[in-house]
Image: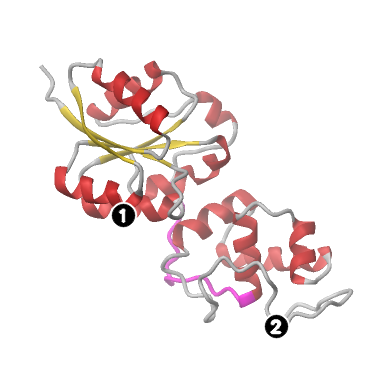
Amino acid sequence: MEDIWKVIIIDNHPALMLGTKMILEETANLSVIGTASSVKDGVDLVASVQPNLILLDDALPEGSVQFYLRQVKQASKDSHVIVLTSDNHLSLFAGLMSMGASGMLSKESSPAQLLHLISSLRQGSTVIPLSWLHQGVVPIPAEIPTDGYFDLSKIEHTIMIQITQGFTYDKIAYMIRVSRRSVDNYLRKIYHKLGVNSRAQAIEKYTLYSHTASFNNAPMTNMITPPESIVPVKEVALD
């Protein structure tokens, strides 16, 4: 008989959390020890219980999913963590797995899919929906930069913050007061520095390593206003 796994659910949607709890407790080898609706309460609970499994909502209000994944893994490094995600976060799959997640699952998945993933974790493996693979998600960790940082300028840092927030390139050009062509030029430089070839790869690598990165003294804030040195011009020459 399999050991009973202790489970903690961290989710700020009470109805969804209750529904997930009921699904899990219908299985004899799973026991939901506690639930939390905030990162702080969840981390405290995880540290106290040291559960086998944590179900973690990717849309908690206290920060990015990378931030609170790190928090729960630091509180209980041996716990499996399944990130319950919305489709717009599929591009982060490789990065989150590199940070210690054991799996990801769409919030629209069926109870059978959730239980199948948990069963796979018990056997030392994980599962990925075929539909995710067809959208370009691959279970390959992003390469860690060997120099320990990304040499991004302040304006390049600003552009990446705006890209991760979902702004279009035209909107970014408007906000930092440069032409769309200049944004394209900056992006080519950013991709080269990050060692990537696409927007999705840039978002994944930037969000994964930005907490330890150096950005030429650029402040680590969600800055959406242009640096004072940027002025409205028709064209900006690259450095």
Q: CA distance from mark 1 to mark 2?
A: 35 Å
Membership of 90 in magenta stretch: no
Residue at image point 72% right, 81% down:
239
Task: Identify the amino acid type marked 1.
Answer: Gln
Q: Which residue is mark 2?
A: 228
- The one of 88 and 236 positioned closer to us in this rendering: 88
In the foreground, 208 or 76: 76
**Residue at disc 2, secondary structure:** loop
User: Tag 2 or tag 1, which sits nearer the N-term?
Assistant: 1
Does residue 219 appear to the left or right of 50 in the view shown? right
Q: Quadrant of the N terminus?
A: top left
Q: Is residue 42 visible?
A: yes
Is residue 165 positioned above or below 226 on the image? Answer: above
Q: Position of residue 208 (x, y in %)?
A: 46, 56
Question: Residue 226, percent across and down?
Answer: 70, 74
> In the orientation shown, which residue stands out farthest toward the right?
234
Q: Quadrant of residue 84?
A: top left
Q: Position of residue 143 (x, y in %)?
A: 45, 56
Left or right side of 10 for 201: right
184 lies above or below 30: below
Residue extending farthest to the bottom is: 229
Rendering quarter of residue 228? bottom right
**Three-letter code, disc 2:** Glu
| 16 to 57, vertically: above or below | above
Q: Which residue is under mark 1?
A: 71
Q: Which residues are magenta?
A: 141-154
Locate residue 133, reporting x and y percent. Answer: 53, 31
